[in-house]
Amino acid sequence: MNLVSVIEERKSIRGFLDRAVSRETMESILQTARWSPSGANLQPWRVEVVMGATFARLKSRLTELAGAGVPVNPDYRFHPETWKEPFSGRRRACGFGLLNAMGVGRDDAPGRRQAWLANYAFFDAPAAMMLFMDRDLGKGAWMDMGMFLQSILLTAHAHGLGVCPQAATADYPDVVRELLGVDRQFMLLAGLAIGYPDPNAPANAWRTPRLTVAEFATFHE
């Protein structure tokens, strides 16, 4: 499998087989991802790999909080306060496309709630990685974290695994830090649901479209 194929084939996975991911595989993914570039070689990433009983407790706690309507308190704002086009339209299309693939109608309130809560259970994935970064670092470190995250996604795909990067799993960072023993100096950026893709999961049959090169790139000669 070459790099171009990995980039073009990878997609977010929201349904997993009941099959464990070994610690050795998770370590192998990070052994590759650690070579990601970072400005001034800061390497700002901190990763908490969560599996087994600890992961079960994390999923249960986050689902409990979200289900009870406890207000979220993320370490940073993921989305803008006010939406504008074309971004608002893309966001709506993404949400409706996923729900449609899952057979959940726009007026199906219980179905939409169930789909939303599935985020906090990491879509029943057998493992996860929680990504943290020192909160005193600048905006450049966010670019570093993005490159590191992409390295994890691509390497996991090359291992035959599926991953879904999730901002929702960072909605209750204090709870996650307490459960995993992480100091508050480290802000929680996202969680990654990791496992072997279930080919029969409806959500996995859907993929978001992409802009053409002509729509986002300008060539100057």
Image (cartoon, rainbow, N blue to C red):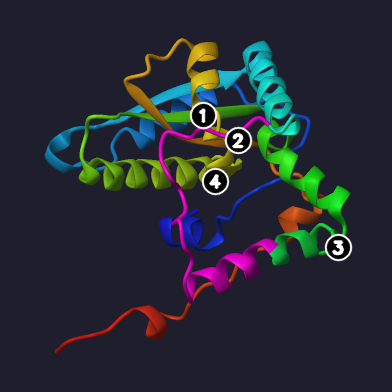
Task: Kindly indicate whether the residue at mark 3 contacts the one at mark 1 (C-beta within 8 angstroms).
Answer: no
**Above-or-below relation of 59 to 168:** above
Name the residue beneath numbered marker 1: 129
**Above-or-below relation of 43 to 103:** above
Disc nearer the start of the sequence (2/1): 1
Disc ID at residue 157: 4
Q: Nearer the viewer, mark 1 or mark 3?
A: 3
The disc labelled 3 sits on which kind of residue?
Asp
**Above-or-below relation of 218 to 20:** below
Name the residue beneath numbered marker 3: 107
Would residue 94 be found to the left or right of residue 47 on screen? Answer: right
Disc nearer the start of the sequence (1/3): 3
Magenta-tinted stretch: 70-95
Q: Residue at x 49, y 66 (%)?
A: 83
Q: Quick one: 218 or 132, which is closer to the camera?
A: 132
Q: CA distance from mark 4 to mark 2?
A: 10 Å
**Residue 82 sits inside the magenta stretch:** yes
Task: Kindly indicate whether the residue at mark 1 contacts the one at mark 4 (C-beta within 8 angstroms).
Answer: no
Q: Nearer the viewer, mark 2 or mark 3?
A: 3
Q: Residue at x 23, y 85 (%)?
A: 219
Disc nearer the start of the sequence (4/2): 4
The disc labelled 2 sits on which kind of residue?
Ile
Q: Residue at x 24, y 40 (%)?
A: 141
Name, please, the residue furthest toward the bottom: 221
Disc ID at residue 194: 2
Disc nearer the start of the sequence (4/1): 1
Q: CA distance from mark 1 to mark 3?
A: 34 Å
Q: For the residue carrying disc 2, how many other residues have a C-alpha within 10 Å: few (<14), some (14-19), or many (20+)?
A: many
Q: Main secondary structure of the magenta part?
A: loop
